Image (cartoon, grey):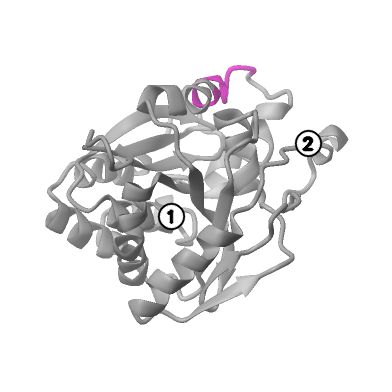
Amino acid sequence: MSANRLPTVFLPHGAGPCFFMEWEPADTWQGMEAWLRNLLPSLNVAPRALLVISAHWEEPVFTLNTQAAPGLLFDYYGFPPHTYQLTWPAPGAPELAGEVAELLGKAGFDTAFNHHRGFDHGVFIPLKLVRPEADIPVLQLSLRADMDPQAHLELGRVLAPLREEGVLIIGSGMSFHNIPLMRANLATPAPAIGAFDRWLQKAIVLPQAERDAALADWQQVPGALLAHPDAEHLLPLHVVAGAAADSPGRTDFHQVAMGVPLAGFVFAD
């Protein structure tokens, strides 16, 4: 890895507050939890800030959270009461929000600021494992509600220079996100369930131009709409892949949970 260019990361954030409650079977999320806890040590980085694009925030234009001390948004439903008492008091990054808005403006993107929204569970649930000390400033950036894959790849390209300024760009989503299928928790998944997962793992190791072209046309892939009836949990990957530039990608985590394949990807020199 270049000494002055941080990697970019796509991480799966699990199901609601899954890492902080009992689950059946008990080991459903243990592998993912262990990977998240070891993420920063494994990357051997000490970022000055985290820029996080979560599947759980969509706005008409790319929008930045400008709070100095964001709260938490418990945007999950039907879980045990103690999961609504979790804490993760990471500071915000309002100065970085200004830097990002300037980059996006120069690239022709409309942007907006949000001064009130807390970190959603796509941010605080996985990052409570990644950085339990909550001592690194975090800037959350929304998806754009039109779900245009090309626009999210381009967003990543615009953000890429931040990697040389100590910013770790993280996409928080799921490589497979079909809630009815996951609730069915199939003991023997149908072959079609694995098709998109296999394609995705091949796509992220392609050279930059081929990788971007593949991700732009993801909906044409066999199994794509089975894996993602909606796009919001995949598009954080487009952002971090765009920001990866010519850094090669790799599958850094893979497991089957709730009957579906789930992966985490790292793009690093």
Locate the N terminus and report the quarter of the image it occupies.
top left
Q: Is residue 175 magenta?
A: no
Give how far across and how far down residue 185 sits, in percent: 56, 34
Amino acid at the residue labelled 2: Leu
Q: CA distance from mark 2 to mark 1?
A: 24 Å
Amino acid at the residue labelled 1: Pro
Characterize the local packing of mark 2: few (<14), some (14-19) or many (20 or more) Cα atoms within 10 angstroms: some
Determine the residue located farthest toward the right in the rendered image: 81
Q: Identify the mark at residue 19; answer none if there is no mark.
A: none
234 left or right of 83 in image: left
Give how far across and how far down residue 152 sits, in percent: 37, 66
Residue 34 in view (yes/no)? yes
User: In this figure, which residue is indicated by the disc labeled 2?
Assistant: 86
Toward which corner of the image does residue 8 lie, by quadrant?
A: top left
User: In this figure, which residue is indicated by the disc labeled 1?
Assistant: 236
Give how far across and how far down residue 251 sits, in percent: 30, 33
226 left or right of 69 in image: left
Give the mark nearer the N terminus: 2 vs 1. Answer: 2
